[in-house]
Image (spheres, helix red, strand yellow):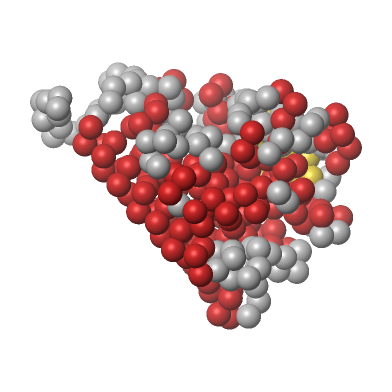
Amino acid sequence: MSDETAYTPPKVWTWNKPSGGQFASINRPIAGPTHEKELPVGRHPLQLYSLATPNGVKVTVMLEELLALGHSGAEYDAWLIRISEGDQFGSGFVAINPNSKIPALMDRSGEAPIRVFESGSILVYLAEKFGNAFLPTAPAQRAECLSWLFWQMGAAPYLGGGFGHFYAYAPSKIEYAIDRFAMEVKRQLDVLDRRLAESEYLAGTDYTIADIAVWPWYGALAKGLIYGAGEFLSVDDYKNVQRWTDQIAQRPAVKRGRMVNRVFGDPKSQLHERHDASDFETRTQDKIGEGG
């Protein structure tokens, strides 16, 4: 075991050197824009600025599901935000999301544009905008749905910023950090597996925004598609999570949503920007279990 006690935190932390790791170039301890850059605006009421990370996939899946239900007002333009190049720090993007994180949405269907940021907030906003689509109205079912939605919002930082960072992206491997977050991620998988043993979907018998929020993170993890950690975390042991993951992956809207703003994996699975439903016709839709 390496010596992990050599570092003594200073009395006052200062940012005087790069943090190291894959995302060091975009990490900083201050907010606000770094450069002036206006965002493009397409012809549809909903303008999405995003990237096909798990948080971005939540929103594109939701929009495609709404369109599949026949909500023509959910037509959208999806513009690519390359976070590795710092697009999220442009002045136009920061004006929509002061937190400089994808996804960010502008709704231009009313008299004045409405900005919506944070993926969970966007899911609730869209659900309510389109007649509580994928959001139950009965009090008990609605509470269950929102509880699992907020579970995801609270749990994912341990998966992404915690486990994913120290296991896959940190410049050096720290045994304590990896063990600590691997333990928590496996506990989270067990939470999901136990719930899905008693319920077809997270909120009950119906597919909801809770599933739309959780699937891009934990479905990808269950299939070994993020952090290269499937074997390390023994994801195949969570049989109910695997069943749920495969079931959702077969939905046509999920297949489409997963492609939007995607810039990695099989080129046929990528649709860098989406401005019309016909944009999918030039791409072969892939399944979550087929890699990339």
The location of residue 35, given as percent across then percent down, is 56, 24
Look at 40% across and 42% down and name the residue there.
Answer: 234
The location of residue 221, given as percent across then percent down, is 49, 42
State the quadrant of the N terminus: top left
Would residue 268 appear left or right of 49 to someone viewing this image?
Answer: right
- When asked about the image quadrant of residue 284, the answer is top right
- When asked about the image quadrant of residue 21, the answer is top left
Q: Is residue 115 visible to the viewer in this orientation of the structure? A: no
Q: Is residue 221 visible to the viewer in this orientation of the structure? A: yes
Look at 51% across and 70% down and name the residue there.
Answer: 198
Q: How many numbered marks are there?
A: 0
State the quadrant of the C terminus: top right
- Establish if 113 lies above or below 32: below
The location of residue 208, given as percent across then percent down, is 64, 63
Q: Nearer the viewer, residue 26 or 207?
A: 207
Q: Nearer the viewer, residue 122 or 257?
A: 257
Would residue 194 appear left or right of 223 to someone viewing this image?
Answer: left
The location of residue 242, given as percent across then percent down, is 54, 50
Would residue 69 appear left or right of 223 to someone viewing this image?
Answer: right
Look at 62% across and 49% down and name the residue there.
Answer: 246
- When asked about the image quadrant of residue 54, the answer is top right
Would residue 143 appear left or right of 10 to someone viewing this image?
Answer: right
Residue placed farthest to the bottom in the image? 139
